[in-house]
Amino acid sequence: MAFSNRFRPMNELSVVHLAQSDSEGGANRAAYRIHKNLQLIGLRSTFHVGRQHLDDVSVIPAHLPGVGLLASDIVAYINALQLRSYPRRLPTPFSPVGLRYGLLDRKLFTEADVVCAHWIAGAFLNFSQLETIEKPIVWRLSDIWPFSGGCHYPGTCEGFEQECGTCPQLASDKENDLSRSGIKARSKSFARLNLTIAAPSRWIADLARRSRLFGERRIEHIPTGVDLKVFRPRDRLEARRRFDLPENGQIVLFGALASTQDPRKGYVQLVRAMQILASSGRQNLTLVIFGGTVEGAASEIGGISVHHLGQVNSEELLSFVYSAADLLIAPFLEDNLPNVVIEAIACGTPVVAFEAGGIPDAVDHGMNGYLAPVGCVTKLATYVLMLLDHNDDRFRIAAREIAIKRFDIAVCSRSYGALFRDLTSARGKPHGR
């Protein structure tokens, strides 16, 4: 990134973040981390959210008085009724735009120099509201929803490069379907915006450059960051005792939001890989799962014991979860730059994953883990066995070093600060890609 040298001091810059929530889901948690670290480096940073959970004076609700979490769920449900016209659609997330529950605080935007949008789907805002923000906007891409017709991940579809329509996720055979109307709504509103794109992974940066909506915009690659003081290697024995895990033997970790329910997270592929491990005669192996449903969950797979932790909301506790494991398995079929992968390597836990989305940004094959072709469960299981058979700490040391080099939240936040300063110093000037 090459930014202008005509920078304003950090303490003179004011940024307002827009996010659907202050804590729900990886995208929102990553956004909140950036917000808090921008405050640490001197920016006046405010987090404007539709669904507030945290007791933080810098988090300002962006909704009508009296509108609670239930009301936001109801509005999202009403918007999703549009999907009933597509009864054969795939079980993948698709977020239509329609009603919204978010109400922007005009005073915040009057005082702001820059607005940073994050994950704002889920009926939080509509695009016409963005048009009323007469300040530079940086949109941090959590997925492709900002430049698609409504889907969050494209699969093999390239419709976002043109005007969408005949959407495979909707199982639509009509050009003028919900995805086409979604692209048109975005195109109309975005034309009026002073918009810069921030891409957490090289993968999503490439998709944005190929897209019809963002292809001519300025696109900066700024990796997702984690707090390396929180996510750090912990004593393995202590970590296992905290969660009543076997003190001896080896532990494979799997986790994500809705880890056992969302097909994109690869739980089916995980089960198949564990069955292969079980058939290999591997002894004293435990699978630990967090982020999924505990009730009714399997207690063993092919004879391998499964320990379910459920939701782990504390970042400090999560660092102990990662440190308890010999490796993280990430069979995600499609993802941007998963928090769990960079959190794991920050804790010195190597990763075996599919070579999907932005994961190769964090996993160097043969250095801090292994990457299998997407969907190749046999190769995934083979790499798990290879990593478990390593008796030295080479992979763990490399994992931590790569996290320090690439994903320090302090460096990430300074990059955003530099981008914000560059935009305010060059306000009014057109930006190319």
Image (cartoon, rainbow, N blue to C red):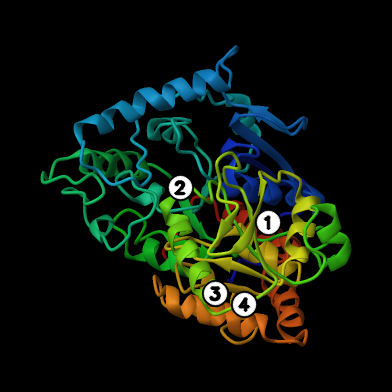
Which kind of residue does numbered mark 1 sit on? Gly
Q: Viewed as shown, does residue 271 lie left or right of 40?
A: left
Horizontal and vertical percent position of residue 33? 70, 50
Which kind of residue does numbered mark 3 sit on? Leu
Measured Cα–Cα span from mark 1 to mark 4:
49 Å
**Which residue matches tag 2?**
194
**Which residue matches tag 3?**
277
The disc, 3 or 4, on the residue closer to the chain's N-terminal end is: 3
Q: Nearer the viewer, mark 1 or mark 3?
A: 3
| Residue at 40% from the left image edge and 59% from the top image edge | 217
Badge 3: few (under 14), some or many (20 or more) residues near its Cα, within 10 Å? Answer: many
**Residue 96 falls in image quadrant:** top left
Say the numbered circle drawn on residue 282: 4
Measured Cα–Cα span from mark 3 to mark 4:
6 Å
Outermost residue to the left: 174
Badge 4: few (under 14), some or many (20 or more) residues near its Cα, within 10 Å? Answer: some
The disc, 1 or 2, on the residue closer to the chain's N-terminal end is: 2
* Callout 3: SS: helix
